[in-house]
Image (spheres, rainbow, N blue to C red):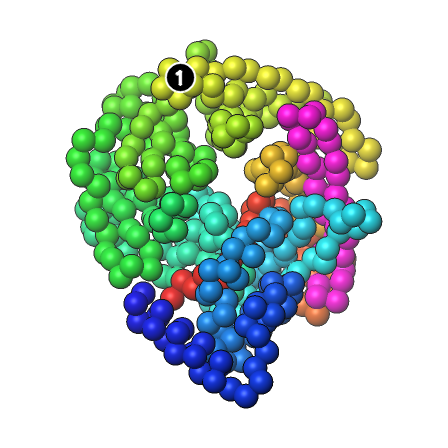
């Protein structure tokens, strides 16, 4: 890290020594207004220009941009990526849909992302030992765990906002849990003993520096929500609401005033949402709120939707189970009990789709059920290498 900082200082000094340079602040202001795909092209122009994207002022300007919905699927031995806006502009329109093909497709043969995937501060755990930055297209192959750590383990990606560090957590059925800090030239470390004995049964996500997943305490013990603080590397169990039966479709989201909410959804005949809000983590106190969404015009059936996550505005994001040329997104804001819809047309039929033969409606490539959706995705230029 010191070496990288020294190189950046030398490049900036070299730039300032040139005759009549454009002020650095002005360059950063121009770059911050460009779409991410344009900036990625500039990264290849020179080391000097690439170094600008590592400056704290530039990183913070991109972090404040509205989050997007990331859509990726595998077809014709290629992996395609679409980046869709969550929010409307003031004139009621949406910003452009960005699309591209991942070039190194040989490393992306698996059709779906890793089962514990989520967009964590712009990074996605794609496979057991691969982390992907969709903004830059980089893929990091981190070292495999030891044989002891690798036995029936679940991998989770987390982010510590205080230290600005990404970590991979390995929850092992052998109770020898491991942690790997990215970008620090570190190897896998054992987490010191003393954590509660538990067995992972599913993934919830990482919120504000804490990883959440479903777990059983001990052998044949009670089911709970296990939390892992990425910074302190400590485990802490949270009891489910009394009488609650966890399911694979349950999801945890951030709620107002920094509280967590456990979300359960039903889809027949209409979409029903039940929110269990954690009022007191230490006392394991929950309150329950229920909502029923009215039927939506233009939708074939509520059963054709899936809850995929939450936007940066706290809206629950529902997307279709089938990806076709017209892609509808339904947003539900539980705090205000409001609904809005977004329609994105031309996913397969635009120039990008036609270039790769995705717009041929007489072929099997005109739609797909096999795709991954990541709401609340942040564009991030932090290098993985």
Residue that sits furthest to the left in the current view: 193
In the displayed structure image, the side of residue 131 where residue 319 appears, left or right: right
Instruction: State which quarter of the image contains the C terminus.
Output: bottom left
Query: Residue lying farthest top?
Result: 243
**In the picture provided, is 263 more to the left or to the right than 327?**
left
**For the residue carrying disc 1, how many other residues have a C-alpha within 10 Å: few (<14), some (14-19), or many (20+)?**
some
Query: In terms of depth relative to the viewer, which is nearer, 230 or 320?
Result: 230
| Residue 120 image offset from top left, x and y in percent | 47, 47
Tell me where residue 79 appears, x and y as whole percent: 56, 61
Q: Residue 15, relative to residue 30: is it above or below? A: below
**Would you say residue 339 sits in the magenta stretch?**
yes
Residue 360 at x, y percent in the picture: 75, 61
The residue identified by callout 1 is: 284
Q: Residue at x 47, y 19 (%)?
A: 279
Nearer the observer, 190 or 201:
190
Name the residue located 39 percent from the left edge and 26 percent from the top edge. 225
Numbered disc total: 1
């Amino acid at each position: 890290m010191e070496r990288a900082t020294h190189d950046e200082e030398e490049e900036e000094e070299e730039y300032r020594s040139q005759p009549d340079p454009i002020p650095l602040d002005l360059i950063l202001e121009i770059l911050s207004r460009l779409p991410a795909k344009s900036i990625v092209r500039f990264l290849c122009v020179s080391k000097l220009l690439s170094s600008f994207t590592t400056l704290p002022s530039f990183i913070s300007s991109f972090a404040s941009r509205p989050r997007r919905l990331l859509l990726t699927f595998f077809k014709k031995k290629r992996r395609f990526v679409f980046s869709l806006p969550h929010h409307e502009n003031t004139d009621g329109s949406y910003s452009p849909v960005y699309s591209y093909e991942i070039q190194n497709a040989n490393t992306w043969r698996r059709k779906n992302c890793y089962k514990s995937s989520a967009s964590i501060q712009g990074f996605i755990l794609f496979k057991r030992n691969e982390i992907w930055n969709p903004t830059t297209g980089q893929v990091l192959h981190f070292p495999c765990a030891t044989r002891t750590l690798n036995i029936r383990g679940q991998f989770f990606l987390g982010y510590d906002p205080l230290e600005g560090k990404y970590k991979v957590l390995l929850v092992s059925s052998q109770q020898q849990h491991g942690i790997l800090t990215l970008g620090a030239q570190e190897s896998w470390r054992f987490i010191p003993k003393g954590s509660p004995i538990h067995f992972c049964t599913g993934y919830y996500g990482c919120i504000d520096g804490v990883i959440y997943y479903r777990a059983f305490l001990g052998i044949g013990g009670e089911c709970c929500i296990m939390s892992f603080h990425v910074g302190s590397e400590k485990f802490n169990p949270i009891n489910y609401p009394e009488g609650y039966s966890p399911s694979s479709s349950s999801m945890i989201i951030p709620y107002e005033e920094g509280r967590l909410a456990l979300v359960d959804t039903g889809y027949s005949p209409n979409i029903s949402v039940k929110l269990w809000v954690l009022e007191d983590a230490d006392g394991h106190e929950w309150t329950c709120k229920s909502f029923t969404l009215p039927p939506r015009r233009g939708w074939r059936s509520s059963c054709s939707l899936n809850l995929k996550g939450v936007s940066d505005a706290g809206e629950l994001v529902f997307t279709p189970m089938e990806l076709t040329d017209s892609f509808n997104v339904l947003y539900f804001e539980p705090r205000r009990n409001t609904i809005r819809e977004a329609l994105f047309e031309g996913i397969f039929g635009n120039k990008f789709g036609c270039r790769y033969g995705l717009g041929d409606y007489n072929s099997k490539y005109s739609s797909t059920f096999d795709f991954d959706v990541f709401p609340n995705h942040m564009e991030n230029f932090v290098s993985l290498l």
